[in-house]
């Protein structure tokens, strides 16, 4: 890989990977350590990495490191939904309370889902990645990705309906 190509790739991808790690439950110091270790491993293996697959390689290495940390600590991975909305001064207090309750419900549902489905929903709706970006990041075919995302959304709806729809109709 050319040196010119590496700089923007690493900056953009490492920011995205850091945000993703925090969203799936890593604390900021673990996420920073994982990002640094991932960059280090990238430079160690740069000659053997296909430039077209560098993004997915970085993502997989970082996520695998995070899951290794979780296994060592024997803790469950919990998703954290961004609360930027709650800091907005123009939002009414009632809206903040409802929004916070919605965030809690979403986190509970996501944490009951298969890890693949949870990760896909976080990448698509929390990080705002396109189908193409997700497919490249995870190194899967577009058709497979669309199928998995459809199943992930259906799983989310099913769990949400089972957990919270009965509460709202009372």
Image (cartoon, rainbow, N blue to C red):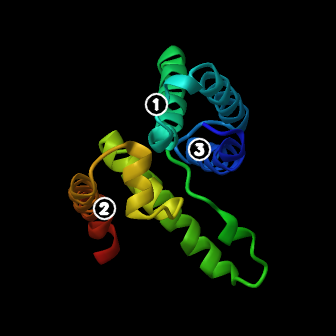
On the rendered structure, is 79 left or right of 152? right
Residue at 27% across / 50% down in the picture? 141
Q: CA distance from mark 2 to mark 3?
A: 27 Å
Query: Which residue has dot 1 on it?
Result: 76
Query: Which class describes the residues within 10 Å of circle 1: few (<14), some (14-19), or many (20+)?
Result: few
- The reply to whether discs 3 and 1 touch (Cβ–Cβ < 8 Å) is no
Seen from this angle, which residue lies furthest top?
Answer: 72
Figure quadrant of the N terminus: top right
Asked if residue 170 shows in the view, the reply is no
Closer to the chain start, of discs 2 and 1, is 1
Judged from the image, the secondary structure of the residue bearing numbered disc 2 is helix
Asked if residue 50 shows in the view, the reply is yes
Judged from the image, the secondary structure of the residue bearing numbered disc 3 is helix
Figure quadrant of the C terminus: bottom left
Residue at 30% across / 59% down in the picture? 156
Q: CA distance from mark 2 to mark 1?
A: 20 Å
Closer to the chain start, of discs 2 and 3, is 3
Q: Is residue 115 above or below residue 163?
A: above
Residue at 24% across / 53% down in the picture? 148
Query: Which class describes the residues within 10 Å of circle 3: few (<14), some (14-19), or many (20+)?
Result: many
Seen from this angle, which residue lies furthest front?
Answer: 2
| Residue 160 numbered mark, or none | 2
Give the mark count.
Answer: 3
In the rendered image, residue 90, in percent from the top left (x then y), is placed at 76, 85
Query: Which residue has dot 3 on it?
Result: 17
Q: Depth check: 169 or 45 in front?
A: 45
| Residue 41 numbered mark, or none | none
Q: Is residue 4 above or below residue 101?
A: above
Q: Is residue 32 above or below residue 144?
A: above
- Foreground disc of the pair 2, 3: 3
Q: Is residue 55 above or below residue 91?
A: above
């Amino acid at each position: 890989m050319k040196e010119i190509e590496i700089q923007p790739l690493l900056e953009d991808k490492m920011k995205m990977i850091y945000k993703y790690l925090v969203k799936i439950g890593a604390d900021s110091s673990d996420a920073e350590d994982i990002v640094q270790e991932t960059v280090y491993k990238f430079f160690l293996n740069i000659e053997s990495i296909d430039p077209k697959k560098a993004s997915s390689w970085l993502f997989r290495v970082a996520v695998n490191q995070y899951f290794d940390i979780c296994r060592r600590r024997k803790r469950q991975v919990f998703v954290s939904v961004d609360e930027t909305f709650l800091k907005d001064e123009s939002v009414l207090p009632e809206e903040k309370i409802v929004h916070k309750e919605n965030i809690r419900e979403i986190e509970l549902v996501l944490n009951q889902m298969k890890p693949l489905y949870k990760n896909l929903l976080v990448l698509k709706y929390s990080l705002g990645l396109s189908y193409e970006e997700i497919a490249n990041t995870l190194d899967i075919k577009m058709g497979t990705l669309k199928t998995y995302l459809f199943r992930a959304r259906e799983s989310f709806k099913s769990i949400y309906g089972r957990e919270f729809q009965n509460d709202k109709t009372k």
